[in-house]
Amino acid sequence: MRQSQLFGKTIKEVLKDETSINAQLLLRGGFVDKLMAGVYTYLPLGLRVLNKIENIIREEINEIGGQEILMPALQNKKDWKITGRWEIDVMMKVKTFFGKEYGLGWTHEEVVTPLAKKYIKSYKDFPFSVYQIQTKFRSEKRAKSGILRGREFSMKDLYSFHTNEEDLDKYYDLAKEAYFKIFERVNIKNKTYLTYASGGDFSKYSHEFQTLSSAGEDTIYICEKCNIAINKEIVENNQPECPQCQNKNLKEEKAIETGNIFKLKTKFTEAFDFKFLDENGKEQLALMGCYGMGPSRLMGTVVELFNDQNGIIWPKSIAPYQVHLVHLGNKEEAIKEAEKIYNALQKEKIEVLYDDRKESAGVKFKDSDLIGVPLRIVVSEKTVSKNSVEIKRRNEEGFEIVGIDKIVGIINCHCEETERA
């Protein structure tokens, strides 16, 4: 992609109205545009990152048997009345000119349960799981923290269906493993804890995945013996205690909730009378689990964790491009060499953002740091005279001089090292 043609521009000045790091850097870097509080347009750079996160999620959820579907965002009022959740405060509602009311989905149990009931009749059809990655809507009173908390946002919601609790427990554990694989691939696993939270109407506990960050809205207590945490919201008598080993010497931290999983059991299948015939021909209520993760929130979390005073430092797995090719000066020979390298990288299927703009070196380097692509290649009259380029890793100081004929090998090696890390 030629940067001169890229839709969306960088912003030099600090945005006074934005207090969160992710909002500052994503807006200034030209990744998103703010339409209003809690509502963002994903520009080409931002959408590339979001798509990569979503594809990682898809791959890991597919591995545990999830089948992708896409359910409507516009939902029936009657189904929400059945479950008693129509009046819940986060529900956004719309009314037509003729007075008919609909809900905008913030979750999809009221859609997926009657959907599954239509097609699943026998114990032989179990277990099964379906998921979607779709826009959700929530009536947040104070949309803040950039894309960490929005009124419109991207969500992966997975729903599993089972004949008995043992099978539900088995899949629940598979989902935990899949979540940590996702976190590992976006480079936040070492800061993310399985966290005990309130089970609400469903069970004693549910589980959240909390990622340590000063930008987090949640307070968690970490048991370093068990490598788990508990959410402050479930602590009784102000005395946190590990639910596994009863350790009371816990570490308090701020964290961002980057995922959650619930054993819904029969709460929704009972409401919609979703039954199946068991091995003996008797009707039984199906059991459910649900598993949520926000790709857009993951994106914001990564920015909160990986940045410096100059901008974002994207992990390679979700960076908008693998390489930022930067041309300096206006000498014809250097321009021709930069074009030649750009075409060669594209031919090798290497994702490259090419800064071909007529800007100063200072402007280009500042923009490059702000955008945060993992590897920067600089072509100038000086480097061309030595048949070489300068290569700089975004997360390191200094640069190295590399022969032009070795560029592809260096890039591939860098990508392999990042994948192993």
Image (cartoon, rainbow, N blue to C red):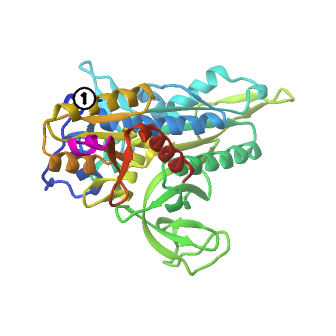
Q: Quadrant of residue 360?
A: top left
Residue 340 position within the rendered picture, expressed as x and y whole percent measured from the top left: 32, 28
Which image quadrant for residue 319? top left
Q: Amino acid at mark 1?
A: Lys
Image location of residue 102, percent across then percent down: 36, 27
- Residue 407 is one of the magenta-drawn residues: no
- Is 246 left or right of 26, judged from the image as shown? right
Q: Is residue 383 visible?
A: yes
Q: Residue furthest top?
A: 98
Q: Position of residue 33 (x, y in %)?
A: 22, 39
Bounds of the magenta segment: 378-387
Q: What is the secondary structure assignment of the residue under circle 1?
A: helix
Where is the C terminus found, in terms of image quarters? bottom right
State the residue position of label 1: 336
Outermost residue to the bottom: 249
Which residue is rendered at x = 18% and y = 38% of the image?
9
- Residue 1, relative to residue 17: is it above or below? above
Say if the magenta span includes residue 382.
yes
Instruction: Specify whether 73 is left or right of 108.
Output: left
Residue at 52% x, 79% y is 239
Residue closer to the observer: 46 or 234: 46
